[in-house]
Amino acid sequence: AFVPNDLVNAYRSEMDRIFGQNSCYIMTIRPFGGIEIK
């Protein structure tokens, strides 16, 4: 799910409560988009 930064901690706590400890992984997406590697 895309979660705004100000709600990440609450979201993660709720997901861990429902699905178990460490069930939620926080990803960061770089601002550059896709890049071709040659």
Image (cartoon, helix red, strand yellow):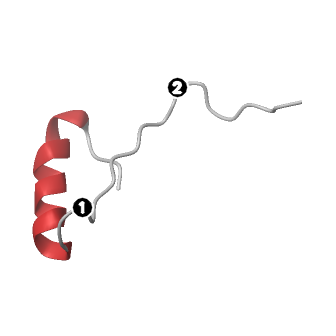
Q: Is residue 19 above or below residue 33?
A: below
Towards the viewer: 36 or 4:
36
Residue 7, image quadrant: top left
The amino acid type found where label 2 is placed reads Pro
Q: Secondary structure at mark 2?
A: loop
State the image coordinates of residue 3 (x, y, percent, origin top left).
28, 46
Do tag 2 and tag 1 residues touch (Cβ < 8 Å)?
no
Q: Residue at x 10, y 68 (%)?
A: 17
State the image coordinates of residue 15 (x, y, percent, origin top left).
18, 64
How would you rate the neighbour count of disc 2 (Cα within 10 Å): few for under 14, some for 14-19, many for 20 or more? Answer: few
Residue 16, image quadrant: bottom left
Q: Is residue 10 above or below residue 6?
A: below
How far, Cα to Cα, is label 2 from label 1? 26 Å
State the image coordinates of residue 12 (x, y, percent, origin top left).
18, 54
Q: So how many labels did they put on this image?
A: 2
How would you rate the neighbour count of disc 1 (Cα within 10 Å): few for under 14, some for 14-19, many for 20 or more? Answer: few
Q: Is residue 23 left or right of residue 14?
A: right
Q: Residue at x 73, y 31 (%)?
A: 35
Which of the image's four quarters has the C terminus? top right
Residue 37, image quadrant: top right
Q: In the displayed orientation, state which residue is furthest to the bottom.
A: 19
Give whichever of discs 2 and 1 has the lower sequence position.
Answer: 1
Which of the image's four quarters has the N terminus? bottom left
The amino acid type found where label 1 is placed reads Asn
Please give the label number shown on residue 37: none
Please give the label number shown on residue 31: 2
Q: Residue at x 18, y 72 (%)?
A: 20
State the image coordinates of residue 22 (x, y, percent, origin top left).
24, 61
The residue that label 1 is drawn on is 22
Q: Secondary structure at mark 1?
A: loop
Towards the viewer: 2 or 13:
13
